[in-house]
């Protein structure tokens, strides 16, 4: 639905998507921890991580609300 894959960076992008849609502390902590871990251990990942966070957050802000959707009614849609 969002276009993110299952890589570590995409998973954080998905958490950033969740923030404006469903603001909860776990998503905030996962995004913050990923930034800290990247800064301390994998600094070369930081630009890609920041891009995924920015993209996910912007997508979450502009998307229609996903809360309380009847997902089973749309399984046949691509």
Image (spheres, rainbow, N blue to C red):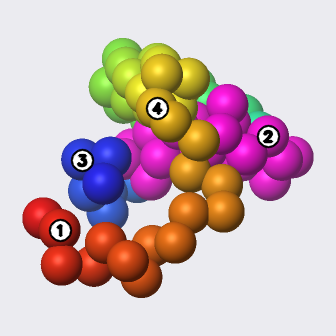
The residues tagged by marks 4 and 2 sit, at their Cα atoms, a distance apart of 14 Å
Q: Quadrant of the N terminus?
A: bottom left
Q: Quadrant of the C terminus?
A: bottom left
Element at label 3:
loop
Q: Earlier in the sequence, mark 1 or mark 4?
A: 4
Picture residue at 80% right of the left edge, 53% below the top: 26
- Can you identify the residue that label 4 sits on? 63
Residue 32 relative to residue 58: left or right: right
- Can you identify the residue that label 3 sits on? 3
Q: Is residue 26 magenta?
A: yes
The residues tagged by marks 1 and 4 sit, at their Cα atoms, a distance apart of 17 Å
Q: Earlier in the sequence, mark 4 or mark 2?
A: 2
Picture residue at 48% right of the left edge, 22% below the top: 62
Q: Earlier in the sequence, mark 3 or mark 1?
A: 3
Between label 3 and label 1, give the one nearer the viewer.
1
- Can you identify the residue that label 1 sits on? 77
Relative depth, front residue between 46 and 54:
54
- Can you identify the residue that label 2 sits on? 23
Between label 4 and label 3, give the one nearer the viewer.
4
Magenta residues, as a range? Answer: 9-27
Which of the 4 image quadrants contains residue 55?
top left
The residues tagged by marks 3 and 1 sit, at their Cα atoms, a distance apart of 15 Å
Number of disc labels: 4
**Image x and y of residue 5, in percent:** 26, 56
């Amino acid at each position: 639905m969002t276009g993110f894959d299952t890589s570590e960076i995409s998973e954080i992008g998905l958490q950033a998507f969740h923030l404006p849609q469903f603001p909860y502390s776990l998503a905030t902590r996962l995004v913050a921890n990923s930034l800290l871990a990247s800064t301390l251990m994998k600094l070369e990942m930081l630009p890609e991580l920041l891009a995924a966070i920015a993209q996910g957050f912007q997508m979450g802000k502009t998307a229609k609300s996903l809360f309380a959707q009847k997902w089973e009614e749309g399984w046949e849609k691509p």
